[in-house]
Amino acid sequence: MRPEQAAALLAAAVAVLVSCTGDVVARSYPFGPRARNVSDLGNQYVPFHAHLWDLLHGRADGGLLMNWQSGFGSSFLPDLGTYLSSPFALLVAVFPRDEIDLAVYVITVLKTACAGAAMAWLLLALRPGRWWAAGLLGASYALCGWSVLMAAVNPMWLDGLVALPLLCLVGEWALHGRRPVLGALVVALAWIANFYTAYMATLGAGLVLLLRLSLSGLPPRRLLAAAGRAARGTVLGIGLAAPLVVVVYFGTRHAYPGRVTEFRPLAFEYLLAHLLPTSYSFSNPAVYVGTAALLLALALPFHRAVPRRVRAGWTLLVVAMTLSMRWEPTHLVWHAFATPQGSAYRQTFVLCGLLVIAAWTSLSYGPPGPRALLAAGGLLALVMAGAAGSMPARHSFTLPIAVLAALAALTGLALLGRAEAPGRADARGGTGGSDGPPRPRGAARPGGRRRAALAGLAAVLLLGGQFGEAAANSAVATRSRATRMDDHSPWGARRQTQAELIAAADGWPRYRTDPGREQTVANDPMEVGGQGAQYYSSLTSDVLSRTLTALGDGWTSRGRSLQSLDNAVTDAIFSVGARVHSPPDPDQKRFPQDGGRTTVSRQPVPPLVTVRPSGTGADRSGFGPSPYRNQELLLGSRVYTVPRLTVRTAAGTPARFSGVRPGAHLGPVAAGTTGPRPTITARCRPGSEVYLWAPHLSGTARLAGAPETAPTGRFRSDRLATAIAAMQRLGRVPASGHLTIELSPDATSTVPDGAVGCLDTARLRTAVERLTATGATEVTVSDGTVRAVLPAGSRGTAVLAAPRIAGWRCATGAADAVPAESYHGLIAVPLDGTSTSLTCTFHPPGLRLGAAVGGVSLLALTLLGVLTAVRGRRTRTPSTTTRPLDRADARVAL
């Protein structure tokens, strides 16, 4: 086995063992009861992988172009390019559908292992050295703090962890004029797998290549040629990925903007703290790479066996990379000129990679001597002292683990130095000594067994120390995430029941089946089936978010995680003919459990395509402030009464009005309080359905005097406006016509004017019958195409109950397709009374441009491959004419 292969296998094995050991210690899934699917991992990434499973097995509603299950119809190709385009994601197909959580876990561990293997291979390509040392440093990179803390719950980022060493390897090929076609293909694969982290990895690999070029000693002409080869391969590779990357780019342009985050540089002591194991903190850069790797990197400036220019170059690169994370202009460059929401230091894996390469550079010239180790140990002691009082290092076990790991690493490196003392590596990476004549081949070294024993003991210490601290770091990260973030159980009885009920009630595309208001995860339709409003993605469209918000829907994640809206009018508008009703998810501990069971309700609804009369055509004027009036606008009928309200506090006094948000201002009610509560009173027609719209209410609401079976409104909002509450149905107006809503806010809340709407169900029924009678008689849906058969003589506007996202084109009869119009945010097509058929097709914006760029890049790469093959064949073919060698030729030949 070649040294590169052995090192890669060792790095992968250590990465897998440490990852699993950490989860065993933390008692985390799949090795214990603690849930692993925290935050976006449970809400986004597992459901997206479940949808991919359905696509691969032909069970999804939609295809590569459209996802008909989420957001009433969302563009899927941008989501695919953001979350699922990694080749590793295809592995979900070999797992059972109800083991999707295990599939994502296995993919995560496998990516981590491949990152370690790729780094170990790169290290030996940069400089020769001990294969087992390269393997351990490769594992250090794979198990860095960024990987364990951040990327383990954002599995698509791990593709960037794999990409960085591979792109650095492509740079080495360009430096030596090798494998131009393969290099471009590697770049393309990296950008296809996850363009976001591939962008950062490409910048990092470019910095490494520039340093390598500056240290190579090549003449300017050859330097420019190598840089040109690297640039050519990068451009061609990104061009090959353009069909996906360009679509994602345009998808982000049409996405809901979310929150603009201002960059604030991190306190330096926090950065130092994150060099230590078990120093967990979500929002800070996790730069831990293992104590041995850190010591070797710290020893590099003092390692005299390393040439001065090499020491200075790598040290300055690591320092410059660190400083770039604290200066806003360079911070923005690393993140494609937009400070990310959530974890702000997503480029940290590049710094971790540079630290590991610097550590290998130090070790490949021979283990650092006592002076260098003493200097590195002193710097590490200063790091520990500076980090001792910082927030991320306040675990009682952080410093003891760091000290033990440092002792093991220092002892191991000292023993390794003793083992190689008689024949320290020279500046070219050799292992022979410089004193005395060379030994004959096969002769044993003096004291060879002793040196081998010392080297073996050093390897054991280094491996043992790294394994222990990395496993502890992984376990602490897993436990900390579970206590600080919302978590979600793996597939179980709740999801299985939901999936079975949805499958039994499903009637798509005659009508939609909504998974329900009480969600299990934020992407329930992709995980348990059905077709609903729920949708959580970084690419949630602006038109969808604004339309549903105007109709009274709620959201989290600053408008990018839309919820199901349990409302009879919106069910009619969006053709939701069946709806699942579940008790609150036990994982969401904010509201008490009511012990209910999961049921399905059905209601008659119009078809997906309806016809609105002339005079109500495409309208771009937007909605008004009342969600009840906005719903009526889309329905085309007046069905609500919006009464005047009286809002009183728990003391019975009128609630004061807040100047920050229009409406009545209410303070929180202490948990367990049994006395009077804040109330809303109003008058409506007896028997009508009561809805409460209070987007900035946090807590519960109940209709006073209602039976125990009446619904309880659960409102989820926060003061930072990262979440607003959805409209809730509370029951029916009593015979007296006087209604009282009791509120139990758990935080400062606001009740807006016009918060209560009373729905006349008889009027709604009449409106549904009218839309059904004039709507499409037949609707078929296949991926990005919708076809409908309309009644003869239909005039006015045909409305498809799907958001009018960019990319829709429609045609009536045999006419040419034109961009679809908008009917208050929905797809609209004018009708002239002569056509009885309607066809709407969807093409993601940017797909044609991306395909053209990809085609040109493929052609250029093919020509490059042909030219390379021809040139190589000519090089291998000996000349038919020969001439005598002169003295200069003879010297070259020798």
Image (cartoon, rainbow, N blue to C red):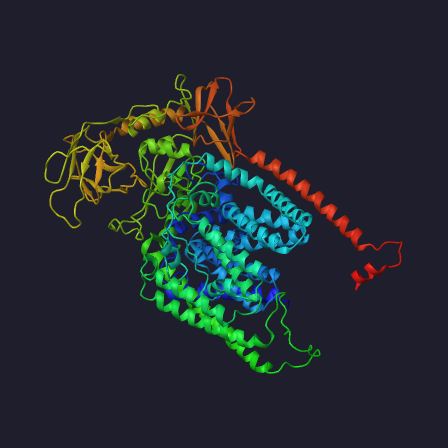
- The answer to whether residue 846 is visible is yes
**Is residue 231 shown left or right of residue 267?**
right
Q: Is residue 343 above or below residue 645?
A: below
What residue appears at the point 58 percent right and 50 percent down from the top-left corner?
210
Image coordinates of residue 821 in percent, x first then y, are 46, 24
Quarter of the figure with the C terminus: bottom right
Residue in the image at 46% along x and 74% along y: 411
The vertical placement of 838 against 870, above or below, is: above
- Position of residue 58 measured from the top left corner of the image (x, y, whole percent): 52, 45
Nearer to the camera, 329 or 759: 329
Q: Residue 692 in the image: x percent, y percent?
A: 24, 35
Image x and y of residue 134, in percent: 55, 65
Residue pictured at 86% horizontal, 59% vertical: 885
Nearer-the-camera pick, 97 or 340: 340
Q: Quadrant of residue 634?
A: top left
Which residue is at the front of the view, 163 or 294?
294
Q: Please give the name of the residue rendered at 77% of the width and 48% of the height, measured from the top-left corner.
A: 870
388 displayed left or right of 106: left
Q: Is residue 563 visible?
A: no
